[in-house]
Image (cartoon, rainbow, N blue to C red):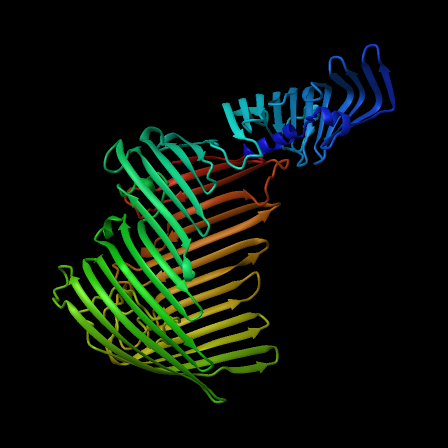
């Protein structure tokens, strides 16, 4: 409704408002002929009459001005032309009270954006402007000669209160294809001169098979302080209850704060008419000395009602406050967080970090890179563990380049102190206070080799590394909380401590090797990598992968950029014994005959995730643009156990530009079929969404759930 009110208000503000001085000095009359009857105090202007003021020009065939009655009547081809290009036409125009009051009959106006309005009468005084029987449309049609638009807005009375700077609508009807669709007894909205004003915003309605008829009615609240505002919304969830939402927003000179509070009575998994409460807060600010602070807090007193009623679909809440500072040579960070898990199978894992303090210092020059890291944290309720850890570490890299080979010498050392206050019952170790010293060395050799074979360019970069890590033996007494799901890949293959993190550091010696390849050909660009890590001594424990052999899987990556039509990406982990695929990811994508397509297939062996079943899935999507209309389809299939189960699919039709019908209305449709849910309280469902987008009015959505 906002933009239509803006359009109407252009007219309200632009009609003449003359003072006596203006009448004498600023208003100019011209006409083909002028008759003056001094006895009757009449002035009659005929033929091409023009009354020009500072803001607009009034044209008519004839103007009769009665000085005694202070009344001017214009007839015949009357128009008012605003300086902004808006044109108003009427059958009769009456000006009174020194041209301060106006009465117009059979009004038609066309605005600069081609939107139009008709009214049977128009009144204007110093305080109010009133349209009687107003009809409005932005559609391309001959509205003036009663051609029916795709949609229009009718109101029996539109009043603009100039002092209150507010527009009031009475008996408003939205018509689509000349059929009444929505009726509003009363509407009000601030006029365009007001940036903010308290009042009701556009309500929404919908229907679902679970809840029945639903509605959301928002009220916008502001004060004289322009740095904050709020919205109170009543969400009626049909036969399952209601919830009230208070949204508060505050803007600072160097940050912002936003919060939401939810309270109501809803049917939940616990009971019907359950009293529920939830809240969230989001904060960001810039402090002195280039420090930044950010915070996010979420809370719900009942696990699933926020997801069930589509207020928040998160499966866990991370509440945190973090301050950080980033400079050219350092990173500093202090963080507190608390997890709240909403899944039944992870209730025992709701860790609380209080706090984590980190500082990293970087020193770089042409041949040497170094990094010093200091950290301390305390974590509680991490699957039954309560742990304090203090760590200090350093890394130095020295680069040596010559025409034969490039060498990178790396050394890293670290000291970790642990206080393990609590262990779960499954961990029978009773060590509480532990220390660990680690020292790692590695040498990496590599060389870029470039070859040209006519039209073919080939770049190959072999890499070979020997690394040795020595650590105080704590692998059986320090729980691995930061890299238990470790597996080798291209990103960590050439790290001295491949496990990353600080919890899982073990004495071992490894040989790591791999080859990067790039090939430019007439049929596209190839890039390929294959590599492996082989442990020649030490241990490889405390990771989820039950296969802890000396040889890692072969790591392979391939991309083939053929053209806009075809592109291929393939990643795999291949068992070093029989080359069986433990993990694969294959993607084919491109644009063929104007159709965008994407196909992704992934599989994961149960041995590398310690699961009971292998995992395999297929994702597929296509899209086509036809005359600015986008058609798309996407689906996800579960391929486990040699079966093909449809998990999710979506079909959508939407218009790429703003308005598809007569430049005033768009209709978007989508269908979603969700057959699987990871949450115990969210049932599989089919959903149909129909959205009507009206020019200058916004969007109205209709959805149905089955």
Relative to 693, 619 lies left or right: left
Which image quarter is the C terminus in? top left
Identity of the residue furthest to the front in this view: 21
Q: Nearer the viewer, residue 53 or 550?
A: 53
Question: In the image, residue 525 lies at what x, y percent?
Answer: 54, 70
Is 32 located above or below residue 543 in the figure?
above
Is residue 641 positioned above or below 304 on the image?
below
> For the point 36% across and 29% down, which residue is it?
238
Is 661 drawn above or below residue 164 in the view shown? below
Residue for point 56% across, 57% down: 591
Report the side of 401 relative to 683 (left or right).
right
Q: Position of residue 292 (x, y in %)?
A: 40, 58
* Residue 503 seen from this side: no
Query: Which is nearer the eye, 204 or 178?
Result: 204
Q: Position of residue 212 (x, y in %)?
A: 37, 30
Quarter occupied by residue 152: top right
């Amino acid at each position: 409704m906002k933009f239509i009110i803006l359009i109407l208000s252009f007219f309200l503000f632009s009609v003449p408002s003359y003072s006596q001085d203006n009448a004498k000095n600023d208003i100019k009359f011209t006409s083909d002929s002028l008759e003056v009857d001094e006895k009757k105090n009449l002035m009659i202007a005929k033929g091409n009459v023009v009354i020009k003021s500072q803001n607009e020009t009034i044209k008519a065939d004839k103007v009769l001005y009665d000085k005694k009655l202070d009344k001017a009547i214009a007839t015949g081809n009357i128009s008012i032309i605003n300086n902004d290009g808006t044109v108003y036409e009427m059958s009769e125009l009456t000006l009174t009270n020194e041209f301060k009051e106006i009465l117009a009959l059979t009004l038609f106006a066309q605005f600069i954006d081609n939107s139009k309005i008709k009214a049977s009468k128009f009144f204007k005084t110093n305080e109010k402007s009133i349209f009687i029987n107003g009809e409005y449309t932005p559609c391309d049609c001959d509205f003036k000669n009663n051609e029916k638009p795709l949609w229009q807005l009718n109101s029996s009375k539109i009043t603009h209160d100039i002092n209150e700077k507010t527009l009031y609508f009475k008996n408003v009807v939205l018509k689509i294809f000349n059929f009444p669709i929505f009726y509003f007894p009363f509407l009000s909205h601030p006029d365009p001169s007001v940036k903010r004003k308290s009042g009701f915003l556009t309500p929404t309605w919908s229907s679902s098979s679970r809840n029945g008829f639903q509605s959301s009615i928002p009220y916008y609240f502001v004060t004289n302080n322009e740095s904050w505002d709020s919205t109170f919304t009543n969400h009626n969830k049909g036969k399952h209850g209601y919830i009230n939402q208070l949204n508060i927003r505050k803007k600072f000179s160097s940050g912002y704060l936003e919060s939401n509070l939810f309270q109501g009575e809803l049917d939940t998994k616990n009971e019907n008419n359950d009293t529920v409460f939830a809240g969230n807060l989001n904060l960001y600010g810039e402090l002195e000395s280039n420090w930044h602070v950010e915070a996010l807090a979420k809370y719900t007193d009942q696990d699933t009602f926020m997801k069930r009623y589509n207020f928040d679909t998160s499966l866990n809440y991370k509440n945190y406050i973090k301050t950080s500072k980033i400079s050219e040579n350092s990173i500093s960070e202090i963080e507190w967080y608390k997890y709240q898990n909403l899944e039944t199978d992870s209730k025992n894992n709701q860790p609380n970090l209080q706090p984590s303090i980190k500082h990293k210092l970087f020193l770089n020059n042409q041949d040497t890179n170094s990094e010093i890291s200091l950290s301390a944290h305390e974590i509680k309720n991490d699957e039954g563990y309560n742990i304090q850890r203090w760590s200090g570490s350093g890394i130095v890299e020295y680069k040596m380049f010559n025409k034969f080979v490039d060498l990178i010498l790396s050394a890293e050392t670290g000291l970790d102190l642990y206080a393990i206050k609590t262990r779960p019952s499954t961990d029978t170790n009773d060590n509480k206070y532990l220390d660990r010293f680690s020292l790692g060395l590695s040498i990496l050799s590599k060389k870029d080799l470039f070859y040209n074979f006519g039209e073919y360019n080939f770049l190959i970069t072999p890499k070979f590394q020997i690394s040795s890590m020595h650590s105080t033996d704590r692998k059986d007494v320090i729980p691995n909380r930061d890299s238990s799901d470790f597996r080798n890949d291209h990103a960590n293959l050439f790290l001295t401590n491949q496990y990353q993190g600080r919890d899982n550091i073990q004495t071992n010696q490894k040989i790591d090797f791999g080859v990067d390849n790039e090939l430019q050909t007439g049929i596209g660009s190839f890039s390929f990598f294959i590599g492996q890590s082989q442990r020649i001594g030490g241990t490889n424990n405390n990771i989820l992968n039950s296969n802890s052999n000396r040889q890692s899987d072969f790591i392979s990556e391939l991309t083939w950029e053929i053209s806009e039509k075809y592109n291929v990406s393939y990643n795999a982990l291949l068992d070093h014994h029989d080359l069986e695929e433990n993990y694969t990811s294959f993607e084919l994508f491109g644009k063929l005959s104007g159709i965008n397509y994407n196909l992704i297939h992934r599989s994961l062996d149960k041995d590398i995730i310690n699961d009971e079943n292998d995992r395999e899935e297929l994702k597929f999507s296509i899209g086509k643009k036809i005359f600015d209309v986008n058609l798309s389809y996407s689906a996800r299939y579960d391929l486990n156990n040699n079966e093909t189960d449809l998990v999710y699919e979506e079909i959508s039709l939407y218009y790429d530009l703003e308005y598809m019908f007569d430049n005033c209305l768009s209709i978007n449709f989508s269908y979603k079929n969700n057959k699987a849910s990871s949450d115990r309280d969210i049932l599989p469902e089919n959903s149909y969404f129909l959205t009507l987008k009206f020019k200058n009015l916004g969007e109205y959505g209709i959805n149905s759930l089955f």
